[in-house]
Image: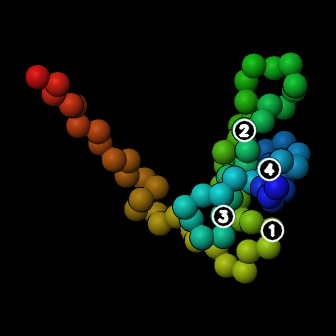
Amino acid sequence: MARYPRVECPVCGGIYAGAPTSALGMVSVHDHKRNRRALVLCAGSMARVPAVDATAYQDELPETAAVAPVAEPIALF
């Protein structure tokens, strides 16, 4: 069975699984907690980091990061 590659969390420095993303050469740090008994996730959970074996990676464009899509209200009837 295949495993996700291991990456370092940019906030707490722990080694966790890196889930694939839509960006080339980037992975998301798997959700994790700083303390096992805590109810709050680490701030580095789901952060995009470059994959360990990536030869190239895709940066976010500045204009797409600043502008969030506006959701239109859906009329049911």
User: Element type at marker 2?
Assistant: loop
- Identify the mark nearer the N-term, 2 or 4: 4
Under mark 1, the amino acid is: Val
- Identify the mark nearer the N-term, 2 or 3: 3
Q: Are marks 1 and 2 in contact (CB under 8 Å)?
A: no
Q: Is residue 28 visible?
A: yes
Q: Are marks 4 and 1 in contact (CB under 8 Å)?
A: no
Q: Residue furthest bottom?
A: 55
Quick one: 58 or 61, which is closer to the camera?
A: 58
Residue annotated with mark 2 = 31
Disc 2 to disc 4, how far (Cα)? 9 Å
User: Element type at marker 1?
Assistant: loop
Under mark 4, the amino acid is: Ala
User: Element type at marker 4?
Assistant: strand
Task: Please tell me which residue is depicted at 29% across the width and 39% down the height of the picture.
Answer: 71
For discs 4 and 3, the disc positioned in front in the rendered view: 4
Q: Left or right? Give the position of 59 relative to 70.
A: right
Q: Which mark is residue 52?
A: 1
User: Element type at marker 3?
Assistant: strand
Residue annotated with mark 4 = 17
Disc 1 to disc 2, how far (Cα)? 18 Å
Residue annotated with mark 3 = 26
- Identify the mark nearer the N-term, 1 or 3: 3
Under mark 3, the amino acid is: Met
Under mark 2, the amino acid is: Asp
Disc 2 to disc 3, how far (Cα)? 16 Å
Q: Which of the 4 image quarters holds residue 56?
A: bottom right
- Identify the mark nearer the N-term, 1 or 2: 2
Quadrant, the C terminus: top left
